[in-house]
Image (tube, rainbow, N blue to C red):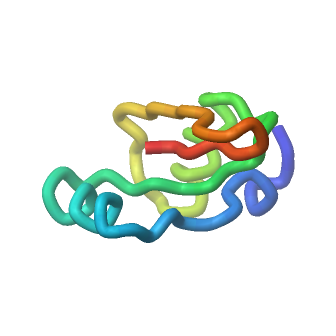
């Protein structure tokens, strides 16, 4: 696994993601393109001291991944 601070690039802050956080406690991040779901889940758990229950990832553009 890479350095945990290299996997998460930053939060995605839009009206939709802000509503998701308020309604269903979901947070969206930009992540490293070659990170897999296990790496992402471990990173979120270590940085934020939470338990990841479910992780969805999509590739909206060729060079970016969004995790919901």
Quarter holding residue 30: bottom right
Q: Extreme front residue here? A: 61
Residue displayed at 67% across by 50% down: 31
The percent position of residue 46, horizontal first and vertical second, equals 59, 55
Quadrant (top left/top right/bottom left/bottom right) for the C terminus: top left
Q: Is residue 58 above or below residue 31?
A: above
Residue displayed at 31% across by 68% down: 15
Q: Extreme left residue here? A: 23
Residue displayed at 74% across by 51% down: 7
Work out whether residue 58 or residue 36 is closer to the camera in this orientation and state it. Answer: 58
Work out whether residue 59 or residue 55 is closer to the camera in this orientation and state it. Answer: 59
The percent position of residue 35, horizontal first and vertical second, equals 74, 36
The percent position of residue 57, horizontal first and vertical second, equals 53, 33
Work out whether residue 1 or residue 21 is closer to the camera in this orientation and state it. Answer: 21
Residue displayed at 31% across by 52% down: 26
Quarter holding residue 62: top right
How many badges with numbers are in the image? 0
Quadrant (top left/top right/bottom left/bottom right) for the N terminus: top right
Q: Is residue 26 left or right of residue 13?
A: left
């Amino acid at each position: 696994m890479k350095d945990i601070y290299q996997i998460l690039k930053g939060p995605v802050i839009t009206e939709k993601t802000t509503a998701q956080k308020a309604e269903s406690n979901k947070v969206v991040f930009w992540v490293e393109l070659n990170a897999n779901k296990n790496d992402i889940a471990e990173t979120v758990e270590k940085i934020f001291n939470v338990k990841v229950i479910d992780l969805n990832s999509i590739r909206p553009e060729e060079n970016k991944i969004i995790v919901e």
